[in-house]
Amino acid sequence: MTLSIEIDGMQAEVEPGTTVLEAVRSLGGYVPTLCFDERQEAFGACRVCMVGIEGARRPVAACTTACRDGMRIDTRDATARRIAAATVELVLSELPQPPPEHTELAAVARALDVDGGELRWPGEQHERAHDERHPYLALQHELCISCGRCVRACDEVQGAFALTATGRGLATNVTAGLDAGFRESTCVSCGACADTCPTDAITEISLLALTESESHAL
Amino acid sequence: MSRNLVELIRRHHEQGASTALEVLKDALEQHGEITDDDRRRAAEQSGLPEAAVYGVSTFYDDLLAPRGRRHVRVCTGTACFAATGDVHIQALSDGLGCKLGERSDDGELSLAETVCLGFCHSSPAIRDGDTIDAGPGVVGRALAGTTRAAAEPVPQSVFEQPLLLAPAHDWTALRRAVSTSDPQTLLEQIKAAAVRGRGGAGFPAGAKWEHARNAEGERKFIVANGDEGDPGSYIDKILMEEHPALLLEGMALAAYAVGADHGFVLTRSEYPRSKPELELAATTARAAGILGRTVFGSDFSFDVTILEGAGSYVVGEETALLACIQGLRGTVSARPPFPAQRGLHGMPTVVNNVETLCNIPVVARIGSAAYGELSPGSPTSGTKLVCFNERFRRPGIYEVRFGTTMRQLCIQLAGGLVDGHEIKALQIGGPLGGLLPGWKLDTPFDFEALAAEGCALGHGSIVAFDETTDMRALARHLLHFGATESCGKCFPCRIGLRRAHEMFSADSPVDRGKLEALLETLELGSLCAHGGAMPAPIRSLLAHFPKELGLQ
């Protein structure tokens, strides 16, 4: 039996177990995300995929909310958009430099009209720290927003378990193995982490060189 | 929580292996710091990949501070703040010549922050090795090297026959249940008694049990949440240390009702006595045939494992608690799935607070009807333990009725404040609860009545701030705690609590509009109650003491 739902006024039928995010995207709708990657289990960390649900007291995260029969979803709910935009603004405030234009983070900030130049809550930023010991993979810790996508790619997609979240609170970050670089870990150089990273915190070296030459040209 | 990691650990767990966290804690006890060799050993023994072990070793407070031969921990909890305005911290650090989180070059001495030691009745508190000293002169004694164990409070009950705090424990309820009652009847009794969770959220225990009972799983588990992290609270501490058999009986009854065969208690490392007391009680019960393969000679089998945390407030959240028990980073997971569906080792798990579980034998003994009448006039059944901080004339733990006014509790029971001080505000139920101003003491102590005032019953701690309290400093104190303890998983909490702390730490006025927008982002955006409810006391300060906050 399928569930009848409504998304921004449009009727849809979905299978039980479908998340709100999957339903919206299957209809071609837009909900911004940062920690979501369709190849991985939903994580619920970034809180940017907030949507309004009729009758709910507060917006919900679309990625971890299952559709219910009769559910009416509003992807343009003003409160949900306000919370998502404020969260992206907080994310930009922890980076010492704006994310490269081609990244998912930059695209989400543009979609939510978040201007990185005028932050309401400036404060402590991540310290610059680069790990370029691996021939193909580079890690720029200051661009890490702790979305967990690289860790999950390594765990769920590749099964190499080479990456981990580190620290806690604002200092949460990511590293390989015992923090001695990718080469000293169980990394198999598959590049799944760089592929999923929404900020270029992890990049394939060739790509990093390319973007650096781009920024020098600017 | 990664399903793959959980699967890797489960196989080792079934063979009785230590968790990565246990191996790391042992290493720290043995040589004062954690080396990569320790991490490799932890990985090998626990089944966790090396990277994941590294992640664990950078998460918990206890694992982060290097230890000298003498390791001193200063309590930075809210009761200690109420007592000293935090001057004890600087005085100790200056006097010892050692900064917080550091170890002297010769390896002799180290000093770390800890929240909270549960001696809120005689703040400030300092832990010197495993000796916890507290009260007037404690800093001087720590500097002179003459710390001594502080006295524990003697709990009192307003009931002629104390319920939770009954002096003798006889296991009658469990014996009767396994020999004359069936699991479904016990479950129905707990549902009829309407036992609400005592850990903070107030969720009906019976409903949680029913979900777990109906869930599919080759095994089921009972978890007692003894991670009483609320600064200002020492209720579960007393239950675990003075009434451990009552807790074990409550767990066994829960297991009987839902079909579980094993239980776990997670105690706090800030309470060094809890784990040994519970282990002693479990050993005694095993020897008497009460725990083990044939509970009271029946075909019901139940045993327990006692584990100790390593310093993290958010581990009190149920999904983070389960992660910690499995030796993982204590971060929160999105629900669903709820633990009752997929919890410890992927199996249906009931997670109940220690005090909640201690209520179960009481219900089973006196019946749901009598239990429902213990707090006449209140919509909540049963009794509640409350505890008061050092600012009161008669601080300590009391068993009280729900619905009693805050005035009766604070003035009649606890005697008002010392030295003629006045109650400026109360924080009830921990850091995620709002502040009740001193002019609202007629508010009843109950879930709904306190919620109407922007407060929470929470776990039942009552911390008074007197008229000398600097409310901006209080906001800064609370937000320091919030930012430091954020598990770092969801973005609003991870960044937002730090930003809120920074706003109150700067010398400049706080922009009210920006603050309120930030609080809303935390409240509506956060994944769990830590980020979601840390704004509550700040909202109270904005509502009742705006002029003292330095706003613009």
Image (cartoon, coloured by chain):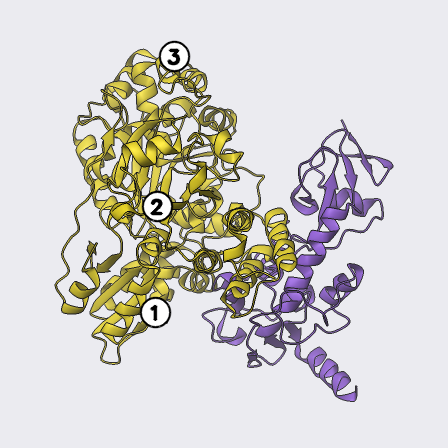
Chain colours: A purple, B yellow
Hey, which quadrant is residue A138 in on the image? Answer: bottom right
**How much space separates mark 3 and mark 1, taking CA atoms?**
52 Å
Query: Could you tell me if the residues under marks 2 and 1 are in contact, i.e. CB atoms within 8 Å?
Result: no
Residue farthest bottom in this picture: A217
Subunit of mark 1? B
**Upstream in the sequence, badge 2 or badge 1?**
1
Image quarter in which the C terminus of chain A is found:
bottom right
| Residue B369's disc number | 3
Which residue is located at x 66 percent, y 74 percent?
A: A203
| Residue situated in front as seen by the camera: B357 or B95 | B95
Instruction: Residue A32 in the image: state x and y as whole percent.
Output: 75, 55
| Residue situated in front as seen by the camera: B419 or A106 | B419
| Residue situated in front as seen by the camera: A21 or B162 | B162
Asked if labels 3 and 2 share a chain, the reply is: yes
Looking at the rendered structure, the secondary structure element under dot 1 is: loop
Hey, which quadrant is residue A10 in on the image? Answer: top right
Per the image, the residue denoted by label 2 is B422
Per the image, the residue denoted by label 1 is B101
* Up/down of A182 relative to B228, above or below: below
- Which residue type carries mark 2? Glu
